[in-house]
């Protein structure tokens, strides 16, 4: 959540710099900031995909264990709990972060328009 607020704050500073930064100090770094936002979006999307695949893979392995094994049942129960509770929470946070990045990129591109190269 802190990262979302940080990105939103940085976006507001960038947008304010369009009118208030007489010497264009912020605008000299705008390309790097936008590239960082896009790269962060890619990394987060890829990470979420791999996170989900990992838990799917673990469940498949546990299914191959004997269903009578008590340790296998315990591990499977813990993974199911983790997937249902934590994965949903992680999903929500990541979606919020991706939305914040999308919104920031949109606001910056709308503010700077054709001056972005």
Image (cartoon, helix red, strand yellow):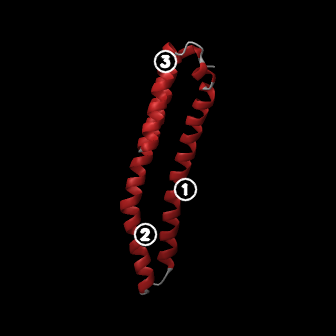
Is residue 55 visible in the rendered image? The answer is yes
Left or right: residue 108 compared with residue 80? right
Mark number displayed over residue 79: 2
On the image, the x and y values in percent for residue 67 come to 42, 83
Q: Judge whether 86 appears above or below 109 on screen.
A: below
User: Quarter-wise, where is residue 81 in the image?
Assistant: bottom left
Q: Quadrant of the N terminus?
A: top left
Which residue bears the numbered disc 3? 111
Q: Which mark is residue 50?
A: 1
Residue 52: % across, % down? 49, 58
Q: Residue at x 57, y 14 (%)?
A: 114
Q: Position of residue 101 (x, y in %)?
A: 48, 35
Q: What SS does tag 1 mark?
A: helix
Between the C-alphas of marks 2 and 3, the distance is 46 Å
Quick one: label 3 or label 1, which is nearer the N terminus? 1
First along the sequence among labels 2 and 3: 2
Q: Quadrant of residue 75?
A: bottom left
- Residue at (42% x, 38% y) in the render: 5
């Amino acid at each position: 959540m802190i990262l979302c607020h940080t990105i939103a704050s940085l976006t507001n500073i960038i947008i304010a710099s369009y009118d208030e930064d007489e010497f264009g100090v912020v605008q000299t770094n705008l390309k790097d900031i936008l590239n960082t936002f896009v790269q962060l979006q890619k990394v987060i999307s890829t990470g979420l995909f791999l996170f989900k695949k990992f838990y799917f893979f673990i469940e498949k392995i546990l299914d191959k264990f004997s269903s009578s094994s008590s340790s296998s049942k315990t591990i499977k129960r813990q993974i199911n709990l983790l997937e249902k509770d934590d994965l949903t929470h992680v999903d929500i946070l990541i979606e919020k972060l991706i939305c914040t990045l999308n919104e920031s990129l949109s606001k910056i591109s709308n503010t700077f328009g054709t001056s972005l190269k």
